[in-house]
Image: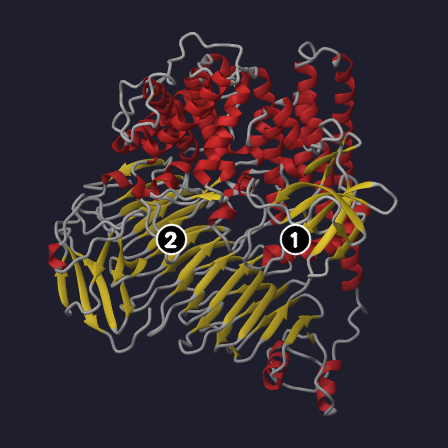
């Protein structure tokens, strides 16, 4: 809302053949005008503000088509462009809450503002209607992305979703990092605000719908969530609260995962309301039965959906049987024969038809190694698939030097590596593995992947890949690997180590994936250790020696995580619970918001709140609602910000710049987390004033005027401007900062 | 110090941007209370708020307070005082305020033509302003608490401690164990006391009566 910047167009201005009657409102992404078309009808015209990206316009192009077949969306009657290239769309004018000639659009926001809270049954009716629209949108692969009371218009008394100019293809939005601002802050889930690279439009819609229920029923502005006015009866709160609390839980996995979960919950609340509130709502006593019937209908629909699911499942199974039936493998030998004929490179996929590990081209039987070697020799982006269930035993590793994709499809493909060594040995290529089972009973390291090429970064994408466990490390990642686990991967015994030089691997554990019995570590003295971002689950994983784990999203409770000796575990908002956390000497566990965990903190282990996590962001000493159930505390353990030692270094706060320091040894001050160093500070060892008193921590450096938040953990190093800074902590609690000349610059 | 979003309190402290809408949301109850206590009607209070915001925002969409002007509280108080006096004088000249407020202090006649730069504790306007500002700070503290704890923790605290609903009834209707309710309330009390002590470090006169 703005009262200062005048509207661009005024009464009687012409806009593409339509006459402006009055400006109506100014939104985040455009201005809204009342216009009169050539037939004399009053309409609403929205001009989309010009932006650097085409999101809004991309959305507007879909509006017309989508609004025609999804009920509950405000119809888009016309779209076009102004002479300066800005897009606009024309919609029916919302009902008028004022008296003509005044006009106040009948939106949910204006209704709440004018009339206060909406009775619970009406709020639930409204929510059910919006939820149905959201479901239809999501089933079409789209999401609204900006659901809020201002965007719920009443047309002829019926609520409709409007302003869906941010309408997005959900796949596009969720896959790529978010660069622009989508949605309205209080209607966007907290984890998406905290992690700008993460955006899930469907989840955002469902979260916003929860806030709609809250705003409509409580009559409160969304910023006051979850406050409810004193006059609202507890019985009513008891019915409505579970709905919006579940929809807006700070832990994503506890929310409604789709509209199909949300809608029955609304039905259930309506049914309860019908039973419990009958005497409270005069004139609505006859509505109990319809509400129950509605709930019954919804339940029947749900049963129908389940049945449909099973029908599809059965059909899918039959389809699979049909495809796997003898005679179904028709094209098994085509590809390599083509090669023999010297013709153009074969189309995808290369089909494997035998279990034998041989290179014997043109024998009519294609082994994995044949297809693999073919793909590697030709240097094409090749996909290797399989004609049926296979159990392929390799005699030596498959060396991946060029990009390749191996897809087991719906077959059961087991690849058994050689007695020692890995199944795949990487050398800087991009590899995608799908639907594979890597069996290993290794006596040596690297049963799944061995990546030892420090010089060349490789990329690995795993989709539904499982392994057979085993005693030795199966996935040894010691290069600059960029690895992603998605869609139900379940891996064991991964060891992530830093290479001799340069940064170590970066691994993302996607939702629905599990990593067990693994460690992120390294003995590098100069470089960052490995990093794992967790959106799934981890069990029995340790992080040490500059390794980093970030719990980004709740993919299920993680179990038995150990942070020690320079390791860092960051629990971001929305990250899952931890059952059994151990913070040992030199390890740092940091959290930002409410966390649920049980664990122990040993001597020298540190638990910190609110690290300055984003690069360049100042450190904030946040206080949060920590649920920290220490089942065992040993020795001089300390935890929590307010119990950190008082005599550490210098304060760089959000509000004040770090005071200039002339003498490194003059450190003093309280509650300090960062140190400013002169760029020309002499090399040497600097014992930091005071003692860490058993608390290890990470230190932010300001070198000259440049701040590097969380650059340095105990046991770690940091290089910048041809100098290397390292931090150590002895068992006496003395922190030593070492400055040394570095052969090359860079972080 | 604060979590997910920077709160209004922090941004005021840091001289960060504050939007018109946000300012309105948080300051409207405060201005309305002052206006009503000084004898303005509801509609006049809205005009007062509008006048104050125009003066504060100075034609811009966002407010960035210049700390060199002194504390925001003092600066804000002076603006409110000027606007209230102007409105009361206008009301006296063009009577349209039919409902006098009996205990409203007379801030028009005793006041000098220009308000003093230094707030005077004995000044009736200053007394009202201080009392209302203290209430406002408490509301900010509660809002800060809302940001720091889980929503499902905060609303229980609010119902039981702020709204004084019987814990037994809350437990019954919300289906929550009574011990959990006590735990949530205890956690919130602790956090709120911390927040208040933080605010008090910058506003020593802030000593709210807590419903704890």
Q: Of the residues under marks 1 and 2, which one precedes in the sequence?
A: 1
Could you tell me which quadrant the C terminus of chain A lies in? bottom left
Residue at left offset 50%, top offset 13%: B169
Mark 1 highlights which residue?
A: A170
Residue at point 80%, 60% (across, down): A322
B130 displayed left or right of A294: left
**Residue A716 sits in quarter:** bottom left
Q: Residue A492 at x, y = what percent?
A: 46, 58
**Viewer-proximal residue, A341 or A668?**
A668
Q: Residue at x 22, y 44 (%)?
A: A671
Residue A271: mark: none
Disc 2: CA contacts within 10 A as few (<14), some (14-19) or many (>=20): some
Q: Position of residue A340 (x, y in %)?
A: 72, 90
Counting from the top left corner in percent of width and height, residue A565 is at 27, 56
Q: Secondary structure at mark 2?
A: loop
The quarter of the image holding the N terminus of chain A is top right
Query: Which quadrant of the figure has residue A718?
Result: bottom left
| Residue hosting label 2 | A613
User: Dot 1: what SS?
Assistant: helix
Which of the 4 image quadrants contains residue A320? bottom right
Residue A472 seen in the current view: no
């Amino acid at each position: 809302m703005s009262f200062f910047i005048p509207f661009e167009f005024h009464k009687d201005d012409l806009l593409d053949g339509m006459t402006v009657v009055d400006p109506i409102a100014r939104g985040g992404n455009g201005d809204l005008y009342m216009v009169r078309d050539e037939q004399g009808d009053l309409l609403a015209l929205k001009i989309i503000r010009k932006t650097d990206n085409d999101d809004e316009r991309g959305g507007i192009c879909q509006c017309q088509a989508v609004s025609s077949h999804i009920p509950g969306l405000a119809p888009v009657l016309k779209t076009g462009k102004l002479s300066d290239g800005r897009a606009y769309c024309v919609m029916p004018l919302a009902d008028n809450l004022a008296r003509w000639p005044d006009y106040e659009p009948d939106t949910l926001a204006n209704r709440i503002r004018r009339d206060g809270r909406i009775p619970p049954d009406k709020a639930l009716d409204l929510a059910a209607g919006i939820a149905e629209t959201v479901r239809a949108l999501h089933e079409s692969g789209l999401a609204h992305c900006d659901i809020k009371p201002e965007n719920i218009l009443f047309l002829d008394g019926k609520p409709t979703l409007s302003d869906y100019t941010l309408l997005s293809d959900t796949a596009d939005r969720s896959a790529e990092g978010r660069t622009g601002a989508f949605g309205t802050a209080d209607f966007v889930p907290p984890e998406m605000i905290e992690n700008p690279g993460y955006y899930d439009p469907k989840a955002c819609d469902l979260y916003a719908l929860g806030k709609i229920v809250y705003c409509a029923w409580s009559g409160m502005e969304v910023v006051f969530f979850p406050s409810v006015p004193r006059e609202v009866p507890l019985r009513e709160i008891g019915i409505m609260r579970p709905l919006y609390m579940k929809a807006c839980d700070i832990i994503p996995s506890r929310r409604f995962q789709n509209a199909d979960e949300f809608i029955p919950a609304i039905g259930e609340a309506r049914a309860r309301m019908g039973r419990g509130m009958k005497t409270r709502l005069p004139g609505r006593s006859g509505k109990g039965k319809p509400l129950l019937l509605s709930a019954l209908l919804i339940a029947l629909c749900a049963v129908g959906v389940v049945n449909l699911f099973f029908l599809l499942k059965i059909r899918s199974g039959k389809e699979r049987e049909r495809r796997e039936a003898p005679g179904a493998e028709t094209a098994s030998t085509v590809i390599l024969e083509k090669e023999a004929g010297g013709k153009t490179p074969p189309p995808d996929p290369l089909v494997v038809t035998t279990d034998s590990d041989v290179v014997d081209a043109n024998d009519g039987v294609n082994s994995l190694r044949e297809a693999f070697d073919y793909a590697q020799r030709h240097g094409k982006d090749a996909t290797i698939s399989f004609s049926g269930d296979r159990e392929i035993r390799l005699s030596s590793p498959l060396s991946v030097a060029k990009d390749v994709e191996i897809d087991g499809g719906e077959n059961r493909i087991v690849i058994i590596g050689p007695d020692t060594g890995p199944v795949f040995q990487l050398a800087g290529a991009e590899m995608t593995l799908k639907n594979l089972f890597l069996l290993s009973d290794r006596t040596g390291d690297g049963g799944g992947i061995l990546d030892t090429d420090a010089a060349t970064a490789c990329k690995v994408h795993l989709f539904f890949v499982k392994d057979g466990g085993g005693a030795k490390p199966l996935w040894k990642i010691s290069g600059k690997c960029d690895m992603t686990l998605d869609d139900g991967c379940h891996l064991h015994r991964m060891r992530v180590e830093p290479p001799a030089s340069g940064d170590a691997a970066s691994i993302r554990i996607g939702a629905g994936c599990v990593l067990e019995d693994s460690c992120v570590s390294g003995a590098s003295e100069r470089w960052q250790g490995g990093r794992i971002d967790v959106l799934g689950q981890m069990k029995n994983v340790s992080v040490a020696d500059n390794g980093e784990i970030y719990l980004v999203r709740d993919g299920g409770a993680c179990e038995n995580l150990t942070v020690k000796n320079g390791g860092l575990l960051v629990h971001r908002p929305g990250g899952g619970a931890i059952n059994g956390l151990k913070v040992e000497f030199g390890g740092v566990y940091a959290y930002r918001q409410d966390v649920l965990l049980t664990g122990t903190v040993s001597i020298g282990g540190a638990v910190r709140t609110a690290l300055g996590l984003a690069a360049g962001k100042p450190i904030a000493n946040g206080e949060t609602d920590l649920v920290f159930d220490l089942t065992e505390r040993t020795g001089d353990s300390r935890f929590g910000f307010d119990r950190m030692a008082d005599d550490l270094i210098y304060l760089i706060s959000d509000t004040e710049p770090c005071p200039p320091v002339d003498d490194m040894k003059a450190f003093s001050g309280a509650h300090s987390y960062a140190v400013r160093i002169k760029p020309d500070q002499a090399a040497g060892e600097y014992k930091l004033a005071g003692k860490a008193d058993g608390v290890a921590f990470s230190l932010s450096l300001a070198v000259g005027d440049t701040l590097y938040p969380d650059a340095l953990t105990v046991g770690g190093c940091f290089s910048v401007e041809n100098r290397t800074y390292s931090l150590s902590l002895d068992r006496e609690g003395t922190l030593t900062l070492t400055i040394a000349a570095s052969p090359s610059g860079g972080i | 110090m604060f979590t997910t979003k920077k709160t209004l309190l922090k941004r005021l402290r840091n001289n960060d941007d504050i939007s018109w809408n946000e300012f309105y949301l948080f300051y409207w109850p405060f201005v309305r209370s002052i206006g009503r206590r000084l004898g303005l009607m509801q509609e006049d209070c809205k005009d007062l708020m509008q006048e104050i915001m125009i003066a504060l925002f100075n034609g811009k969409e966002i407010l960035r307070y210049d700390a060199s002007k002194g504390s925001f509280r003092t600066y804000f108080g002076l603006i409110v005082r000027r606007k209230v006096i102007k409105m009361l004088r206008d009301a006296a000249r063009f009577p349209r305020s039919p409902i006098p407020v009996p205990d409203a202090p007379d801030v028009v006649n005793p006041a000098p033509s220009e308000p003093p730069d230094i707030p005077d504790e004995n000044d009736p306007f200053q007394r009202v302003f201080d009392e209302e500002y203290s209430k406002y700070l408490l509301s900010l503290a509660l809002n800060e608490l809302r940001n720091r704890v889980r929503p499902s923790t905060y609303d229980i605290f609010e119902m039981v401690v702020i709204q004084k609903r019987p814990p037994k009834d809350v437990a019954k209707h919300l289906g929550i164990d009574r011990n959990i309710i006590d735990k949530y309330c205890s956690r919130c009390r602790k956090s709120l006391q911390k927040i208040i002590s933080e605010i008090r470090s910058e506003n020593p006169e802030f000593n709210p009566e807590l419903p704890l």
